[in-house]
Amino acid sequence: MYRIRPLASIGTDSSAATRTALIEAAAPLFAEAGFEATRTRDITDKAGANVSAINYHFGSKMGLYQAVIKNQAEEMHASFPIETDAVRGEDPATRLHWLIHNLLRRVLAQHDDRRLKVCVREFVEPTEALDFLVKEIVSQQFDIMKSVVNAVLGHEASPEMLNRFTVSVVSQCFHYGMAEPMLTRLGVQVPSTDGDINELAEHIVSFSLAGIVAGRKNGLMP
């Protein structure tokens, strides 16, 4: 004898499934065409949902776009955390090593999954969602990056100097993802295998550590 679930429970499950379907359908469409060019009808058709479902679940097309960005960021953070409780207790060089390896994997993962290009596209072709992306996601990640770089520096740096060192470190990773079409035309190999990614990450770690040491010696630090 089977048990009948309450109607409220059935409705909740169905609603959650529709919400998830909309996010999963919208991600590759936003990544391919951008926010403006993506039609809500195409999203709902792909999700098998009613045309009014986007407004019902997200309030607007922009609300769905922000949900896609948040979902994508959470997936990347879970798959490639730039710091963990265990790593936080390690020496500064090990923390930097972990940061660069996982950040580079985040950047290069977008080549294997079109959905992961949404955040990258928002950086290059910003919409009003950029403020949401920075406030809700990027600012916290940048604070972690600065904490790691500050530990490598060995003493407190001025806010401006710490920002410069941090951007110098992480930009080496971002450039391979955001400038990939240009780099390939210049004959620069963009890593695609785990071995290639590890090799590039080790280079960036070594280069960054040497740069930070040189910066201290040459009086760039207060």
Image (tube, helix red, strand yellow):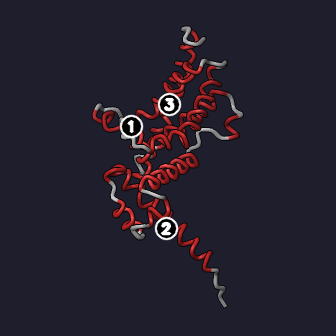
Q: Quadrant of residue 90?
A: top right
Label 2 sits on residue: 18
The disc, 3 or 2, on the residue closer to the chain's N-terminal end is 2
Given the image, on which type of amino acid does mark 1 rest?
Met
Find residue 187 and name its label: none
Look at the image and tell me in which quarter the N terminus lies: bottom right
Residue closest to the eye, 165 or 137: 137
Q: Where is residue 30 in the image (x, y as percent from the top left)?
A: 38, 52
Outermost residue toward the left in this view: 185
| Residue positioned 54% across, 40% down in the render | 135
Label 1 sits on residue: 178
Query: Which is in the foreground here, disc 1 or disc 2?
Result: 2
Q: Is 195 on the left or on the right of 86, as rendered?
A: left
Residue closest to the eye, 189 or 33: 33
Given the image, on which type of amino acid does mark 3 rest?
Val
Q: In which quarter of the image is residue 184?
A: top left
Q: Where is residue 39 in the image (x, y as percent from the top left)?
A: 33, 58
Label 3 sits on residue: 170
User: How far apart in space, not on screen, are marks 3 and 2 (Cα)?
Assistant: 37 Å
Given the image, on which type of amino acid does mark 2 rest?
Thr
